Image: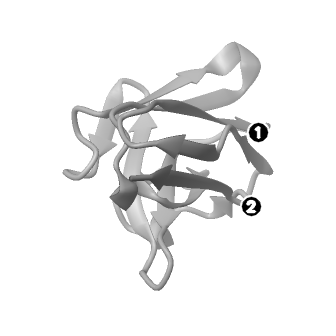
Amino acid sequence: QVQLVESGGGLVQTGASLRLSCVGSGRTFSRGWFRRAPGKAREFVAAHSGGTTLYADSVKGRFTISGDSAKNTMYLQMNSLKPEDTAVYYCVADTMGRMTTSPVSYNSWGQGTQVTVSS
């Protein structure tokens, strides 16, 4: 497992942008983002490993995942935010060679950062 720390959440209006950051030390196979809205189950958002990326259909075309290996940092650029994007966003990583849309595939989780989009 690796230690992950997210930042960059906040309160914005519909249509605004936010960039989340996740700093994590240690060697990982894949990294990604999940979110949990109030009263709902955890939901896959995006993940990347090497040159491969996965996005949930609900964020495709609006969110972009990227990484800076020199800084051990992963980003989630979120554009055209909607109220339904409101959730706690979690940075995740896997050290075992997996990249899927299932939360059980990731063995490292950050503490979460709140994103609230007002209408």
| Residue under numbered circle 2 | 111
The CA span between labels 1 and 2 is 17 Å
- Give the side of residue 116 with respect to residue 6, left or right: left
Q: Amino acid at mark 2?
A: Gln
- The front one of 33 and 70 is 33
- Give the side of residue 112 with respect to residue 119, left or right: right
Residue at (53, 42) in percent of width and height: 12
The image quarter in which residue 90 lies: bottom right
Looking at the image, which residue sits at the far top? 70
Image position of 9 with respect to 106: above or below: above
**Quadrant assignment for the N terminus:** bottom right
- Give the side of residue 55 with respect to residue 8, left or right: left
The image quarter in which residue 79 lies: top left
Residue at (75, 48) in percent of width and height: 4
Q: Residues within 10 Å of mark 2 (few under 14, many from 20)?
A: some
Residue 89 visible in the current orientation: yes
| Residue under numbered circle 1 | 26
Residue 30 position in % (x across, y down): 50, 43
- Give the side of residue 37 with respect to residue 5, left or right: left
Q: Amino acid at mark 1?
A: Gly
In the rendered structure, which disc, 1 or 2, sits on the residue that comes first in sequence?
1
Image position of 3 with respect to 12: above or below: below
Residue 118 position in % (x across, y down): 46, 53
| Image colouring | one colour
- The front one of 20 and 5 is 20
Q: Secondary structure at mark 1?
A: loop
